[in-house]
Image (cartoon, helix red, strand yellow):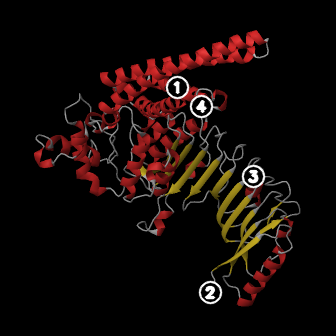
Amino acid sequence: MVSVLAGVMASVISKLTALLGEEYTKLKGVRREVEFMKDELSSMNALLHRLAEVDCDLDVQKKEWRNQVREMSYDIEDCIDDFMKNLGQTDMAKAGGLVQSLVQQLKALRARHQISSQIQGLKARVEDASKRRMRYKLDERTFEPSISRAIDPRLPSLYAESDGLVGIDKPRDQLIKWLMEGVDPSVQQLKVISIVGPGGLGKTTLANEVYRKLEGKFQCRAFVSLSQQPDVKKILRSILSQVSQQEYANIDIWDEEKLINAIREFLKNKSLELPEGVGNLHALQELREIKVRWDSSASSLLELGRLTKLRILGLRWCIINTHSNKEAFVENLVSSLCKLGRLNLRSLCIRSDYGYSIPLKEMYGYSIDFLLDSWFPSPNLLQKFQMDAYYFFPRVPAWIPSLENLTCLDININPVKEETLEILGALPALLFLWLSSESAAPKQRLVISSNMFTCLKELRFTCWNNGEGLMFEAGAMPSLEKLEVPLDAGRNLDFGIQHLSSLTHVIVKIICTGATVQEVEASEDAIRNTATLLPNHPTLEIRSWGEEIW
C-alpha cells in the first residue's frame, strides 16, 4: 500500500513542478502556494518511501495518516489534470475565429479562478497533514529501534552464565563424548549432532555450552546462530571474523562472493575430516581439503557416490600401505569415484598428508596405485586431475587417454618414457601439463614432435635425473606460452627451444651436480643466446639445482 502511494505522490509532485513552468506564468496568484505544496509533498514522499520498508509494522495512527495523504494526493492530481485539460482546449481554439477565441479566453480566466480557489483549499489540507505528521512525531516513532525486532530471542542463551545453568552438565558431557570419541570409543569419527525439540527447552544454551568446552581444542572455530530467514552476508561475516580472529576494513559492504573468497583463502591448506552423513548433502557441488585418515569412517567414502551434483572433489589421502583396513577405504573410494565420474565430476585433486611431523620414509607409504586401472568407466567430463603426493605412477593410468575434456593435468610418473609423452600428447583439450618424475628413461632422448600437445599452453617438467633430456622438433607445441624444464649443465644444450615460436616465459633449471663452474656458466650463456632469437622475446629465468657441489 505504502509503495503504491509513493508512486502516486511522485506523479503529483511532477505535475506541481509543471505548473511552475513558463507555460503557466499567468498563475501568479497561486505560484507561491503551488511551490509550498510541492516542497511539503516532496518531504511527505520521502517519509512514505521509508514507511514502505516497514509496511507490515505500521500502527493504526500511521495507517490513518497514510490514507489521508492518499486521498489528498488523488484530489490534487484531479485538480491539476482538469486545469491542464481546460487550458489545453483554450490553446487549441486560438487558431479559430475571433468570437471563438474570446469565448475560450473567458473560459481560461474562469479555469484559472477555479484552480486558484481549489489550490487554496488543497494547500490548507497539505498544511494540516504536515502538522499532524509533526504533532504525532511519525518520523521518530516509526523508525525508533524496536526491541522485539532487534533482539534475537536466542541471544540471552548465548550469554548465559554456566554457573546459573541447572541440569545441563550431563547432556553437555554426553554430547562432548560423542563428538570427541564417537559412539564407539575405539573408532574415532567426526560427528554431526542434531539437538532437536520444541522452543524453550534450552537447545541453543546446550549447544553453546558444548562449544565453550571444546573451542580450545580447535585452531579454527565458529559458532553461528541461524534463523528461518537467515542473513547470509551476516553469517559469512561472523564466520570469517571468528575463524580468522581479526578485523577487516569495510567488511560491512563486502558482497557474498568476496566474503566466501576471504573465508576460502584463510582456510586454504587446512583440512576437514570426512563427516558421516555427507551423502545427504545432495546439492553439494564442491568439496575440498577432506582428510581421509586411519580414524576416518570408511563408510563415509562410500557416501560420496551419492553426491550427484558434485563437480569438484579434493582429498588428502592419509591411508598408508600398512593400514589394517586399507582395502575397505580403497574399495569404497573407487566405488564412489566410478559413480561420480559418470555424473558431474569435473575436477579431482588427491594430496598426501605429509608434513614436518611425518618421517620422510613414511611419506612414500601413501600409495594411490589403486587408481591405475580401477576407474571404469572413465570420467569423461573430467577437466582437471591433480596429484600432490610423494607417490609416482609407474605409467599413465589406463583411464586418462580417453579424457577428451581434460584441460589441466598435474601428475607424477616414474620413469618418464617416450610412450608417456605420446599418450599425454594425444589428449585433444590439454592446455596445462605439470609432469614430475624422479628419472627419465636412460640413454633415450625424449622427443616431442609436431603432432603432440597441439593445444598446450604451459608445460612444467620436473625430473631429478634428467637422462638425455627433452628435444622439441620443428613445429612442436605451436601454442606453448610458458615452459619450465630441467637441463644438465654442459650436456644437450641444443634441445630445440628455438622451435617454440609462441613462448612468452621460460624457466630453465640447470642441474649443476658434477659440473664445473665453467660448464654451468657456458650453459647459462647458451640458453640466453637462444632465447633472444625467439620471436616473442620471452622473459627468461635461470635457476640452479645442486650448486653447492660445484
Q: Which label's residue is closer to the chain start, 2 or 1?
A: 1
Closer-to-camera residue (324/57): 57
Tell me the kind of residue under disc 1.
Answer: Gly
- Density class for disc 2 (Cα within 10 Å; few <14, some 14-19, many ≥20) is few
Q: How many angstroms separate mark 4 from mark 2 (CA)?
A: 92 Å
Q: Position of residue 159 (x, y in %)?
A: 21, 47
Question: Is disc 4 placed on a helix, strand or loop?
Answer: loop
User: Foreground mark, 2 or 1?
Assistant: 1
Tell me the kind of residue under disc 4.
Answer: Leu
Q: Residue furthest right?
A: 474
User: Foreground mark, 4 or 2?
Assistant: 4
Image point 78% across, 79% down: which residue? 491
Query: Can the viewer see residue 319 in this picture?
Result: no
Residue that badge 1 annotates: 7
User: Foreground mark, 4 or 1?
Assistant: 4
Residue that badge 3 annotates: 423
Q: Position of residue 119 (x, y in %)?
A: 50, 22
Image point 89% across, 63% down: which residue? 474
- Density class for disc 1 (Cα within 10 Å; few <14, some 14-19, many ≥20) is few
Q: Which label's residue is closer to the chain start, 3 or 1?
A: 1
Image point 48% across, 29% down: which residue? 37
Q: Is residue 113 above or below residue 235?
A: above
Query: Can the viewer see residue 54 in this picture?
Result: yes
Q: Which label's residue is closer to the chain start, 3 or 2?
A: 3
Q: Is residue 498 above or below residue 209?
A: below
Tell me the kind of residue under disc 2.
Answer: Ile
Q: Position of residue 515 (x, y in %)?
A: 70, 85
Residue that badge 4 annotates: 20
Residue 11, image quadrant: top right
- Density class for disc 3 (Cα within 10 Å; few <14, some 14-19, many ≥20) is some
Residue that badge 2 annotates: 549
- Rendered-image quadrant of the C terminus: bottom right
